Image: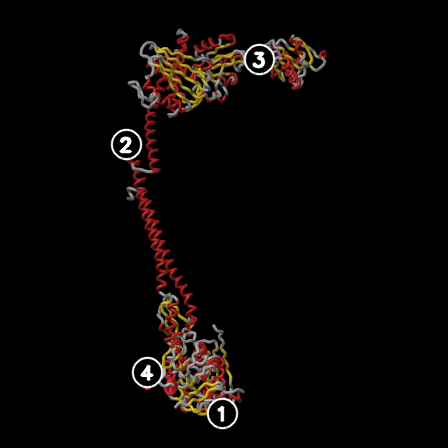
Amino acid sequence: MKNKMTSVICLILFSKLAFSSSLPIVGYGSSDAVLNAKNQELFLMGFQAGFQSNLRKSDIKDLLIIDQVSDGSQLGSMKVAERLLSKGVSLIAGFPTSHEALLAGSVARKFGVLSIFSGAGHSDLGKMGPTVFTTGESMELAVETMLKFIRKKFPNKTGMLISNPYAVFSKNQEDVTIQKIRQKINQDIILYPAHLSKSLTLSQQDILKIKKKEISYLVITPYADESARLLEQLQKNEIDLPIITNSSWTTGDLDFGRRFMVSLKSPTYCQALWMKGSKDSIPFERLIQKKYGRPATSEIANGYDLGVIVAKVLNGITGPITKESVLNSFKLQKCFSGLSTGRMCFNPNGGHAEKKINFVRFTKEGFVPVEFK
Amino acid sequence: MSRNYPLLFKLVLTQLGILLLGFFILVFVYLFTFQAQIDSTISTLKEQVTPVLAEKEEEWRAWNYLGLNEALLSEKNKLIKQYPIESIEIIQRKDLPNQLRHTAIVLPKKNKNPEDYVLYAEISSKTLKNAIEAQRTLFYVFGCVASLFLGSVIFSALFIFKNIYRPIMALNQFFLNRKEDVSLEFNKLNVIGEMKQFVDALEEMLKRNQKFEKQEAYLELAGQVAHDIRSPLEALKSFKIEINEIPENKRIQLELSINRIEEIAFNLLKNYKQNKNKEDVRSEELHSLVKSILIEKEIEYRFRNVLLIEKFNENSYGLYSRIQRNSLKNIISNLINNGVESVTEGTSIITISLYESDGFNLIEVSDNGRGILEENKASLFNKGFTTKESGNGFGLYHAKKIIEAAGGKINFHSNSNSGTTFYITLPKSSPPLHHLDAIHLYKYDKIIILDDDLTFHEVWKNKLLEINDRVEHIYSAQEMLSKYKTLPFNTLLLTDYGLMDDSFDGIDIVLKLNHMHDSILVTARYEEQEIIEKCSRYNIPIISKTSLSVIKVIYKDPHLIQNCNIVLIDDDKFTRLNWEMYCKRKSISITCFKSIDEFLFHYKNFDSIVHIFLDSNLGENIRGEVESEKLAKLGFVNLYLATGYDQEMVLRPDWILKVCSKSPENIIEILK
């Protein structure tokens, strides 16, 4: 068992704000069930930067409570959410993976507390009702965008849809992809499904299939760090095929697979929400450089966008801060600008943010946008 | 059954009770161990499975929340295949069965929220079934053992009933109805093993008992006869005094016969009183035994043409063998009877001999009859063999058995028409303490004969003819006691046991006179144990009246040193040794004594003319010249004083012939 280390940090007193409640209003939580602690920290850094820089009210006290679990616990996010809610928070934020968001969302929705997660894309998050939201793109949208990309780049070619049945995001993407390619519009797309084993590698049968050149491209649904063993296996088997991945590769830590990816001749395509150096992103990047003395990353960008949204929700509250007033403020605003990704809108019925999904190509120097319309 | 066979009923009931108890214990133990085994198995399986499930539990619950059902199913199936698990479910706590089974595992344990999902697993029933099956096999084994035990109980009950109970009941019935003279066929009891041995022993005992009962009846009859015979016998004895007119030998014969009848009557009565049917084996004096038979036979055959010849001499007396006295008497009596019967014409001449031969005592009974046919010789000692019309064939068979039981032999020599001789050879035995080999009269100056029977006084007169002047005859205890309060030294008392009309018997007289060491009991009742014990206690020898004719009378001491010329009485050992050495060289016979008292103890062994040398200083202030007077008074005439002192200085009494030195060389001079 991993040593359980729970750190609860109660901080951030904004003496200038004048909220009458003595209870914390925002609970930020995360667990390392999927993403490691370093990535989680990047999300938090971004969140704090966005939150602090956008909060206007000066009479708010004890606004934020942060609860993180870093013991590898699979239900860690659930426990964190329960703890935060037990402390009476009116808004749940954080939980930047689908795994965390789904578990925390299932707890928060019971309390009717507004929960906004950063970057989680699982399709089930859209089914959790009008109090659960995520800044992540919708899985349906992501898959549709990916299929469009495939149709354009690899017409009439057979690809392999590689998924990790033990990872919720990957599995969800596979499910949605299979569901989508059954649709008439996608009939020309042929994707052969392959599952990673517990050791996160393909079976020999699948490898053989690839080697026989029956496969022209690979669609990798697991996170970049989960795919490191797979990339190593491909390299060992001298498989060099174009790879198409999701947005987690641009959000998560790509360094786990960088060693293998740089050796590939074939391109590696990823989906991306935050485009570094874009017009919308530059103020954010400067802020981060100024605040933390380091360049911004997609994790920080994700956290930043959530922090900005949460701050704007609080800014929009006119009366006493309650979970209802928080929810009302969120729903009234609906769309939020000044984000690293520009403007982001939410459906009042809950679910994913409506935003543009871009495709980028991996290079040693970084991601390069790919036009495919 | 309980009424007819209470013992068997109890046995079977007890065994069945034990069996039932054992069965209940078995069931209890089985159920207990069964449950314990199940619990233990479940516990073991849970211990094996729980950590594995605990490791997965949180992940699986997360997967359940996240909808990773395929992964969950795959993992669950994998685990079910790998471990003894029946099923695994992730369900809400509220959906758990109300009553959880022992085989159920619910994880996590701490979570009590009914809405929360938990891992609910069941231990594999197949594994449990296997454990139960193993337990059942054990129960079957127990069952088989119990059945075998039940079988053994039934078998043992039947076995006991058939082989022990039924025979015992038959025996019991037999004993109950024994007075009604119901016979039991032992061979039909159908018994085996130790029970057979018991029944055989019982049968043998019953046979012996029947024999004993017959003997008892005979004994009772004998007791009655003995009792009835005593009155006329007493009358007969009272006439003994008046039969002096009868010739002496006839008178003795008659006397002995009366005594013998009295003795037989006494023995019969005694045996009857003591309820004895078995005679003791003792060391018996054979002469008196044979003689008593001959006396009987003389009377028996006095009117028939039978001549009984005794070939006894002085050596015939004092021969002892260990045997049943009456049995041997019967054997000899039978042999005499057979001998008499074997003579069909003329005088039957029966010769009885008794002598010692090669360390054995030999009794010979010869007849002049027709002899034994050759064809009968081999079967003569066989059981049931007889040539007589009225015989039963047991006489010689029993004779052989008895003689052989005593370590002896019986055989015969027979020539056709020249008679038959039976030889009874018996091992010699030590004489008893009360035995007297001869009457040593040389020790005594006076002999007193105490007997109420005049005829025996006559016998003694003839026997002691040489020394009749030293014999005193006394006829009753009263006379004896009135005459003597104590008896003088060197007086021998020969006394009868039963003294008519006296309240004292012979032993009483001896004890009253305190003369045990110089008295001899002379009685016809020498066989009676009571008298023997009494005599043994006071060390009084016994002589049978019947053996008077053969017992030796020794007038002269056999130890008398006929050729002894010199006697030296000196307390100095070296002086004695010196004289002995000297005499040996000179071939002169010498006997040395260390004191006068020692010599006086043996003085009768020496002739009165022997040369006696006395030391003048015999120690302890005893002076030879003084003490020598005693020797002079005893008739010793050649007395000398040998002294180490100056001879002139020694006073010489008149009875001392000469005073000389202690040098043995004086002997030569004196002998010259």
Q: Nearer the viewer, mark 2 or mark 3?
A: 3
Q: Mark 2 = which residue?
A: B183
Q: Position of residue B366 (x, y in %)?
A: 38, 14
* Amino acid type, residue under disc 3 in the picture: Ile
According to the image, what is the colour scheme of the structure? Answer: secondary structure
Q: Mark 3 = which residue?
A: B561
Residue at disc 3, secondary structure: loop
**Outermost residue, front direction?**
A212
| Chain identifier of the residue bearing label 2 in the image | B
B537 relative to B249 in the view: left or right: right
Marks 4/2: CA–CA distance: 115 Å
Marks 1/2 same chain: no
Question: What residue do we see at 35% from left, 70% from top?
Answer: B97
Marks 3/4 same chain: no
Q: Mark 1 = which residue?
A: A283
Q: Residues within 10 Å of mark 1 (few under 14, many from 20)?
A: some
| Chain identifier of the residue bearing label 3 in the image | B
Q: Position of residue A132 (x, y in %)?
A: 40, 84
Q: Residues within 10 Å of mark 4 (few under 14, many from 20)?
A: some
Q: Quadrant of residue B294?
A: top left
| Chain identifier of the residue bearing label 1 in the image | A
Marks 3/4: CA–CA distance: 161 Å
* Amino acid type, residue under disc 2 in the picture: Ser
Q: Nearer the viewer, mark 4 or mark 1?
A: 4
Q: Mark 4 = which residue?
A: A182
